[in-house]
Amino acid sequence: MSRRKRAPAVLKKKTAAVPTVAARPFAYRNRTLHCDGVSLASLAEQHGTPLYIYSASQITERFQLFQKSFASRSHTVCYAVKANSSLAILRLLGKQGAGFDIVSGGELERVRKAHKPALKKVVFSGVGKQAWEIDAALKADILQFNVESEMELDLLAARAEALGIRARFALRVNPDVFAETHPYISTGLSEHKFGIDIKIARALYRRAAKSKWLDASGISVHIGSQIRKVDPFAAALERVTALVALLRRDGHDIRYIDAGGGLGIDYSDAPFDPAHQVERYAAALFKGLGDEQAHLLLEPGRFLVAQAGALLTRVLVLKKNGSKTFVITDAAMNDLIRPALYHAHHEIVPVRQPTGKASITADIVGPVCESGDFFARDRAIANVKPGDLVALLDAGAYGMSLSSNYNSRSRPAEILVEGTTTKLIRRRETMRDQLGPEVL
Ligand SMILES: *Cc1c(COP(=O)(O)O)cnc(C)c1O
């Protein structure tokens, strides 16, 4: 059933003001799957497979949905780099005014290279920041460190003093809110390693105020990823907002509230209205914030890039073992690990539009030597044969960024589609790339 149908009338009305954004930029034209104006068959011809393909216009549209829905507030969208850290995608978002949420010194260097002016809009998250990473971020004059432990706060103060640069920081509090998602990507319960117990945060801010090298500029929260219901976001922000009032009373000049990321998408073939989802999300955050006027920081990752991307792969072999049929593709878990890691579902569609209804039920798997190397199990899929191309949809987030060289496989090339033109944004790896760092 469509989410739109279930929505209360008042929200439905609001949605109408936002231009419709298709959930995916992939559609059949002349019986061939296209990304915007570009045929996936021709991309495979030109660049080989497996191949990641992203739509620039879809990423832009998603970013603009956030800009629109949060327009009534002073805010910055800090795209979570780890979702897809391609330089071209970072530049695309940076040029539109996005800031960035980073989790390592490496991601800081990516932002610097992709769009240097965005360094001042960087927030630095992560539970294990090292001195060299903190130093690099201090020198880059990033917006804020999201600090996740008392020890990290001490380290930050020490590095700030050593460099003579005052550090703006937020404590990332753990609001003890349950967000219904996969256990590996839920972070907002006190049993998780993330954040600082909200009950002791006030005392830590008080302690931090004793160091002139620390500036308590904000507070942050992030409760997990692929969260579909928006109520947990409201609940978390409500707790954070209550704490901000206390912190101000204690004399801290809190200017930023960082609401984290985590807004989920629909990976199935059910109708999905991204504009409506962002509207609901904004409404939930506004509810949690009440009258609070601090500058709002948002850290969406998946929502901006997941549905813009697909992993294009070619069928190598069809194989029957007993009663089971296997479709073996030239992409594998090293290229897209989400099904193996989270039992994640990805829609898999043939590039040549099927003419009849003929389908097979099969496991779609890669060539890697692991039973966990699967993309789908017992999936009804069009009658494919060796040599056919299929696309794994919604692979733009946590696809390439989680890829590896396992089984000594070279990682895929990446293409950015801009309307009817295409740009190779990362060439296919070669064995030379793989062997380069090794010493005999
Ligand atoms: C991973 C992460 C995000 C992005 O999460 P999405 O689910 O991709 O939106 C944002 N903030 C922090 C701190 C994260 O760790």
Image (cartoon, rainbow, N blue to C red):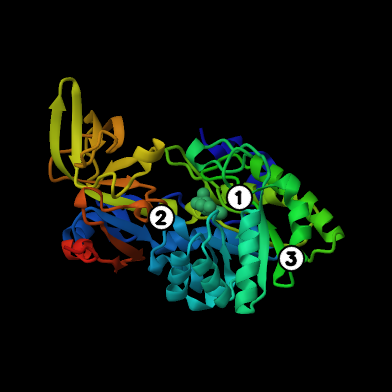
Q: Quadrant of the C terminus?
A: bottom left
Q: Is residue 129 left or right of residue 326?
A: right
Mark drawn on residue 46: none
- In the picture of the structure, the residue carrying the numbered disc 3 is 255
* Alpha carbon separation for disc pair 3 and 1: 18 Å
In what element is the residue under mark 1? loop
Dot 1, how many residues are within 10 Å of its Cα: few (below 14), some (14-19), or many (20+)? many
Looking at the image, do the residues carrying marks 2 and 3 touch, with CB atoms under 8 Å apart? no
Figure check: 329 above or below 403: above
Question: Which residue appears at 63% of the width and 72% of the height?
Answer: 160
Looking at the image, do the residues carrying marks 3 and 1 touch, with CB atoms under 8 Å apart? no
Question: Which residue appears at 20% of the width and 57% of the height?
Answer: 44
- In the picture of the structure, the residue carrying the numbered disc 1 is 222
The residue furthest right is: 249
The x and y percentages for residue 154 are: 65, 62
In what element is the residue under mark 2? helix
The kind of residue tagged 2 is Ala
Mark drawn on residue 308: 2
The kind of residue tagged 3 is Arg
Q: Is residue 343 left or right of residue 214?
A: left
